Image (cartoon, rainbow, N blue to C red):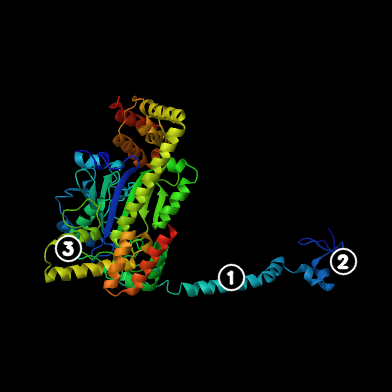
Amino acid sequence: MRCARCGAEVTNKIIKINGVIYCENCVRELGYDRYITNPEEILGAAFSPLDEIASSFAKMAELDFGNSALTCPKCGLSLRQFENNGKVGCIECYNTFGDYVIKEMFRQQGADEYAGRIPGQSLITEGDDSGDSEPEEDAKNESKEETKEEKSESAKAEENISDEKTLEKLSKADIGMLTDEELTNGIKLATKFENYQLAIRLRDELKGRKEGE
Amino acid sequence: MAMWYEKFGKDQDVVLSSKACIVRNVKGYNFPNRMSDSDFDSFMEQVDGAIDKSVTGNIWSANALGSGDEEGDSLLTPESQLFGRDMSIIRNPNHKCIYYSDDAGTSIVVGSNEHLTIRSMAAGYDPSVYARADKLAVELERKLDMAYTEKYGFLTSDIRLTGTGLKMLYTVSIPAISKSNGALAALRQRVAQYHMDIYPFAEQGELADASVYIITNISTLGVGENEIISKSKMLLNDVIELERSLREKVATKNKIQSSDMYGRAYGLLRYAGVISRREAVDALNWLRIFKEYDDSGEINVSWEKINKLTQDVCWEFIPPGKRGSMDAPAIRAAKIKTILKGDD
């Protein structure tokens, strides 16, 4: 195939302008440079805004993981490793990755405050491993028996501590799960300890249930 | 001695097993995923001295593997549920050791995902598994300095367990719920209300949709042990009640068809020469649905056997290389036959 202008053989690129075939030199001389521009350059220019966006994302990612080099001084676990599998390597990790751990715990569990028992102190009373009675119920039964006898000062103090613990549990509990009886007892207890906010919450729950019936 | 899962259990027509798992870590050592060999040796020494051998007197460790100890070997079965469903502990035994009771119902796994995993398992619905596991946990807490803070409770490697470190797991077989329109969706909603989770025993493979589910608590933070136990009790009562009422509906509404399916199911289990896991579980489901309504008196199979068979099939471990071969279905069928033979 030959150039229609100079007659030279067209080897690499066939450039057709208005149906006429030209060689690369003639195209340049005629001022049709845009027809011989490298397509990659054109595409590159066309997508250059996307490149900019992509690079800004990369910069943002660098900012987000700016602490990815953070490593626990005790066990050597990196923050990136923790983020990948949700497991820490030692107790110190809880301090090293503090906020990240708390955020993840909250995301997984919906809470970040402990509400369980303290080490070495069982909630199960001696001789009761049936699992059918609650420690609260045991406390209630105990208190009934005690009313038959004259309570000593120490017993009263113990009862107060137990009441306070029950009250604390009530304040953390999902009140929708409590029985009517538990709510009634809770109101009495909350009033006794002047925790009126809790008493009102419990009262409203009980009232709501009665109205719903 | 009968294994824990061969014993009688309450509400065992619905609940296959109850398990309480409590995890604890000891201060001064990295968690198992970052623990060095030398640390593990001194850690093991400390833990061994603290464990009460009167309860969990047997020990399995990497060193004991292949020792030929008959009692130990008999427990090296997936059905004992000591080693995890994929037998991961045996496949990677380094830095791991298990102390267990004679019936394998109580165990302390050392060095698995956390330093100590205290586990109590019982057949049927038995919330007292918590008390047994808690007793062991308390004893260990008195002897070992545990990783604990007032704010977050017991610290764990897996932050989904931080707090009480307690997981209550109930394995339930609920064919009537899972086959009834809308019942499973309603149950899922109920479970979510209790802030618990229900998921199939197997998400995929032969046992997917096999009507065996696990119910467990989600949170270990923000809730105390009592709340976890009482919520799981309330939920399990609901599940048992719902499943039984739906079984009654199925069995009485279509008595002829149900009775037919029941007889066919027993026949398949009793006489098949080759049986897949799915076929076996489906047949066991029909035994479960109709057993209480069968007045013919021709089939006498106890709940203990139905549950043992269900658990044997569910927990059966087939090594990756042998999956797809005909050996496993033939061996399975022969085992089932042997167990049911005694009822004839």
Q: What kind of element bears circle 2?
A: loop
Q: Secondary structure at mark 1?
A: helix
Residue at the disc numbered 2:
A6
Q: Earlier in the sequence, mark 1 or mark 2?
A: 2
Does label 2 lie on the same chain as label 1? yes
Q: Determine whether, in the image, residue B131 is placed left or right of residue B214.
A: left
Q: Chain of mark 3?
A: B
For the residues carrying marks 3 and 1, which lies nearer the camera in this image?
A: 3
Counting from the top left corner in percent of width and height, residue B225 is at 28, 60
- Between marks 2 and 3, how big is the CA–CA gap? 100 Å
B35 is higher (above) or lower (below) than B263:
below
Residues at marks 2 and 3 touching, judged by CB atoms closer than 8 Å = no
Secondary structure beneath disc 3?
helix
Q: Are the residues under marks 2 and 3 on the same chain?
A: no
Q: Quadrant of the N terminus of chain B?
A: top left
- Give a yes or no on whether discs 3 and 1 share a subunit: no
Q: Residue at x 34, y 71 (%)?
A: A198
Instruction: Give the residue pinned by disc 1.
Output: A54
| Residue at horizontal 37 percent and vertical 36 percent from the top | B288
Which residue is at a point 46% across and 41% down the rendered structure image?
B179
The percent position of residue B131, horizontal first and vertical second, equals 23, 54
